[in-house]
């Protein structure tokens, strides 16, 4: 009987969440049928069958996170049709067997260092604990009280991973108590334990996108990086934008300042291929395409759709594409291909009135540009004191890929393109 495995759906994917089953145990399936929806760090994708047959077993419940390559279902001829195997990781044989809960809700446990599983608060008074048979067996073997463990499954279900995290946390605490580690020593940010929930706190479970983004951006902090900030005179850029938009009656056809910045970055990256690069371990990877990611805030977390070959597209094409990508990102309709392959990212918070900030590198890219709001500052022009709109931009750089002088040369040329906006369209 062939197993259906959790596929690798993106280059950064390490696990996926089986958000919902679309086929039930006992259903006939054909090659190409969609069995379930898989939520990754980038998008929600279809899990298709590669076999004809009958869905005999679902090995994981909806809502479970599964590492790539692990089985999630079994397809056969129908003779072995059963519910989930109670001894399979993440299995759920029908409704969870209720376990009496403690009378008082315990404090939510701190996750083990580096643990990324979603946690709920402890059980409420009089509630029943939902747990898989394998999780109960692990807890029993390690003398753990299930009532003290937060569940990451649907409706707070306690899974095998939850119990394993609790075991690891207890062992880490015992190590510190034995003196092999200094319990009072400050912990690194990437391994810091989260704050426990207080009685009146509202607990919001992490979605897959926010959870995996948190892990990847924490990993980004291990990259040796530095920051370069400069001021850009955008008086001519704003006038240039107004001139372009003067003949565009449709609001959706207008060019934004961010569109101009994306195009300017593409022009500067084309002239500085060493910045359009990534760290490859023992080599540096200089990319043949200038693909610029645009950071977009969505209800489920930060997404970065990519404008492919931005240096080869017109300003109008970039404006139309970025608008479409941002709208579909917020609606959750982006495809995987539209969020992969970026070589440089632009993050703009100017529309929120932020003057300056530093952005976190989006691995494996070598740099990201943070854009603040344009504000009027006093300047002397032709012997007169006038207000000039100035923009602060900050480049965050992976020091393994670029040195300060190289990054500064790129930022200098980018500033020149923004201050002479005709260079953006040539």
Image (cartoon, rainbow, N blue to C red):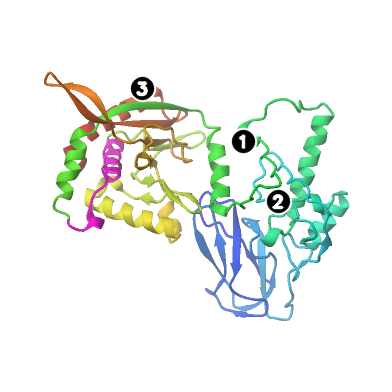
> In the image shown, does 217 or 146 lie closer to the viewer?
146
Residue for badge 1: 190
* Residue 17, above or below 341: below
Above or below: residue 403 compared with residue 88 = above
Residue closest to the far front = 200
Q: Secondary structure at mark 2?
A: loop
Looking at the image, tell me whether mark 1 or mark 3 is earlier in sequence order.
1
Residue 167 relative to residue 235: left or right:
right
The image's mark for residue 405 is: 3
Q: Which residue is mark 2?
A: 121
Measured in 3D between alpha carbons, the distance from the residue under mark 1 to the one under mark 2, in whole angstroms, is 22 Å
- Dot 1: what SS? helix
Q: Badge 2, how many Cα within 10 Å: few under 14, some, many 20+?
A: many
How many marks are shown on the rendered structure?
3
Q: Residue at x 58, y 73 (%)?
A: 22
Residue 343 visible from this viewpoint: yes
Q: Secondary structure at mark 3?
A: helix
Q: Residues under labels 1 and 3: Cα distance?
A: 30 Å
Q: Quadrant of residue 16?
A: bottom right
Query: Which residue is depicted at the point 63% across and 57% down?
Result: 69
Magenta-drawn segment: 249-270
Q: Above or below — where is 286 with respect to 37?
A: above
Residue at image position (22%, 29%) is: 388
Q: Earlier in the sequence, mark 1 or mark 2?
A: 2
Give yes or no for contact between labels 1 and 2 (Cβ–Cβ under 8 Å): no
Instruction: Decide which of tag 2 and tag 3 comes sooner along the chain.
Output: 2
């Amino acid at each position: 009987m062939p197993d259906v495995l959790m596929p690798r759906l993106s280059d950064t994917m390490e696990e996926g969440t089986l958000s919902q089953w679309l086929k039930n145990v006992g259903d006939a399936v054909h090659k190409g049928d969609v069995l379930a929806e898989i939520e990754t760090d980038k998008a929600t994708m279809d899990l298709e069958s590669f076999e004809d047959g009958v869905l005999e077993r679902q090995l994981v419940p909806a809502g479970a996170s599964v590492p790539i390559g692990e089985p999630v279902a079994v397809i056969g001829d129908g003779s072995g049709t059963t519910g989930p195997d109670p001894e399979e990781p993440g299995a759920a044989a029908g409704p969870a067997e209720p376990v009496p809960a403690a009378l008082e809700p315990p404090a939510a446990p701190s996750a083990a260092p580096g643990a990324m599983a979603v946690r709920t608060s402890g059980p409420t008074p009089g509630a029943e604990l939902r747990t898989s048979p394998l999780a109960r067996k692990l807890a029993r073997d390690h003398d753990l009280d299930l009532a003290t463990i937060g569940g990451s499954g649907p409706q707070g279900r306690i899974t095998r991973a939850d119990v394993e995290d609790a075991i690891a946390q207890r062992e880490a605490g015992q190590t510190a108590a034995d003196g092999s580690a200094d319990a009072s020593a400050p912990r690194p940010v990437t391994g810091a334990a989260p704050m426990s929930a207080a009685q009146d706190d509202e607990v919001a479970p992490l979605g897959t996108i926010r959870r995996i983004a948190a892990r990847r951006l924490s990993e980004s902090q291990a990259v040796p990086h530095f920051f370069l900030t400069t001021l850009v005179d955008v008086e001519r850029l704003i006038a240039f934008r107004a001139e372009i938009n003067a003949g565009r009656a449709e609001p959706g056809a207008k060019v934004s300042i961010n569109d101009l910045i994306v195009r300017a970055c593409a022009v500067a990256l084309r002239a500085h291929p060493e910045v359009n690069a990534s760290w490859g371990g023992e080599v540096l990877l200089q990319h043949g395409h200038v693909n610029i990611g645009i950071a977009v805030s969505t209800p489920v977390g930060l997404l970065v759709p990519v404008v492919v070959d931005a240096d080869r597209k017109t300003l109008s094409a970039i404006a139309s594409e970025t608008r479409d990508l941002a709208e579909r990102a917020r609606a959750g309709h982006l495809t995987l291909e539209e969020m992969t392959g970026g070589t440089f990212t632009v993050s703009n918070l100017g529309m929120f009135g932020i003057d300056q900030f530093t952005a976190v590198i989006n691995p494996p890219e070598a740099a990201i540009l943070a854009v603040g709001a344009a504000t009027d500052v006093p300047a002397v022009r032709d012997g007169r004191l006038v207000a000039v709109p100035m923009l602060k931009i900050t480049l965050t750089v992976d020091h393994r890929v670029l040195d300060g002088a190289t990054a500064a040369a790129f930022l200098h040329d980018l500033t020149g393109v923004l201050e002479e906006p005709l260079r953006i369209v040539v």
